[in-house]
Every structure is written in C-alpha cells, then in structure tokens.
Amino acid sequence: MNENLEKEEDRSEEEHYLDEETLFIVSQTFKALSDPTRIRILNLLCSDEHSVNDIAERLDLNQSTVSHQLRFLKQLRLVKYRREGTTFYYSNDDDHIINLLKQAIDHASHH
Amino acid sequence: MNENLEKEEDRSEEEHYLDEETLFIVSQTFKALSDPTRIRILNLLCSDEHSVNDIAERLDLNQSTVSHQLRFLKQLRLVKYRREGTTFYYSNDDDHIINLLKQAIDHASHH
DNA sequence: ATTATATATGAGCATATGTTCATATAAAGG
DNA sequence: CCTTTATATGAACATATGCTCATATATAAT
C-alpha cells in the first residue's frame, strides 16, 4: 500500500471530511457576509429591490463602493439585477444565504 | 426639528435598521467562519474535543497556526478548552454558530 | 534541577481586502 | 450630436489577515 493511498484513507476517516471545493464555497460565502458594508447592503435588499444610487444614499456610501461590492455579491450569485433604462435595480438572489444572515443578526441582536 | 433628529428618524425608517454593535458582532462572527483553516478546525471539533497537537496533525497544520486560530475562535467564544496536565482539549462552544456552519456546508456540498 | 512535552505568543512577511479617485461606458433627452 | 444621468471599472493606497519562525511559558517526568 503506497503513502498516497494511506493519506486518502486518513482523510476519509475524519468524521466529516470537507473536500476542497466545498471548503472553498463555504469560505467564500461567509467572506461575503463578513464585511459590514456588504451586510448592510444585503440587509437593505431584504426589504425590496433598490438601485445602486439609492443604496449608496440610504447607507451613506460612495457610488463606487456600492458598485464594487455589488459586483462581488453578484459574482457569488447572492444578488441579481433588473435593468430599466440606465438604472439597475438590485435584489437578493439566494434565500438560503440570506436566511443565514438573518439568523446571525437575530443571534447577535439578542446580546 | 434639527438635522440630527431627522437623520435618526431616517435611519429608523430603514426596514430593518442594524445598530453598530449588532453589525460588528455579525461581521466578526462571519469573519470567523470565512477562513478555510478555521472552518476545518471547527468542523473537526464538531465530532469531539481535540488537543492542539491532535488538530495540527489531523489537519496537517503548524502547531503555531492552530494555536493562533484557536485563540481567535476562543476570543469570540466559539470554542472552549479543558486542561489536563499540559494538554488542552478544545471543543466547540456555540451551538448556534456551529449550526450556521453546518447549514452552509450542507448548502455548498449540494453543488 | 534538568529535560521533555504541550501550548502560547510576538515579530516579520507576503498576500488579501476595502475604499477612493478618476475615468469609462451606456442609455435617454434635448 | 451633445449633455445628462446611472453605473461600472481600474489603479493606487492603506489596512487587515494568516502563516511561519523563533522563542517563551508551564507542567510533568526522571
């Protein structure tokens, strides 16, 4: 039996082995939720869709900052947008992850 | 009516206003869950308590790296430890947050 | 006391992250 | 066309993050 095989076995014996891809997705997802600006944006989008400028004004953020963060969230499919002329209305696109955020907010606000 | 009061009102009219402290706790919590090394440690601790060296060996990490990350997790009360001589047995200490992690892993592994 | 074992800690370093500034793109109105 | 409005993008910068190395601490064993 060669060493690589042994290593494979060792890893599969870990109680709940996490493969690299799952690990990457999980870490990326939580990374998205780990920044105050992104949390505020996602929280705002819980109520309704909002345009980029509207988000920027309501949260007192730079238009550029909002746009950059929305691109980040879009790439992870946490938000989507609908276009109307030159205006882009963004909204949440992953109920499951938004639910995680709501749970954490609930948990945190009770302390 | 002065401007500060108006601003206060504006903020409270946001559908679900997040106060600074809640925002900070939520972001810190998700930051803890956003690093692959910490995810692997917490995942390992789901099954049982483990010593620092045991964690390091099982996950193929530096003892120093594990110790640093455990301190980080400890400070957020996500893990606790039990001492036996020179050995420290670490285990998870926040079921709710561990539950969030499990949900995310479940969500991620289905894709 | 000396040595071995287990863990913690701090400095240093490379990389990642988030914001801002300036500018680009693109649709709409005149 | 030219201008206005809304958004996107890239470079630059400051700060945060995570790892490693060396070393400190603390208990146990001989």
Image (cartoon, coloured by chain):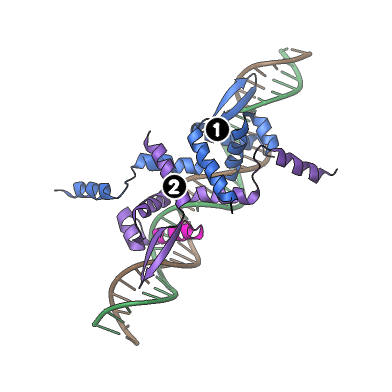
Chain colours: A purple, B blue, C green, D brown
Identify the residue position indicated by label 1 in the image.
B71
Q: Residue A51: which quarter of the image?
A: bottom left
Name the amino acid type tagged 2: Asn
Q: Position of residue B51 (x, y in %)?
A: 64, 28
Would residue A16 be found to the left or right of residue A70 on screen? right
For residue B58: magenta? Answer: no
Where on the picture, by quarter, is residue B48?
top right
Q: Quadrant of the N terminus of chain A?
A: top right
Circles 1 and 2: CB atoms closer than 8 Å = no
Query: Which residues, given as a range, are shown in magenta?
Result: A65-78
Relative vertical location of residue C27 with respect to residue B51 in this rendering, above or below:
below
Say which quarter of the image contains residue B50: top right
Tell me the chief SS of the magenta region. Answer: helix
**Farthest right residue?**
A1
Residue pushed farthest front?
B110
Q: How many marks?
A: 2
Left or right placement of residue A98 versus residue A49 in this view: right
Q: Is residue B111 above or below residue A16?
A: below
Residue receiving disc 2:
A99
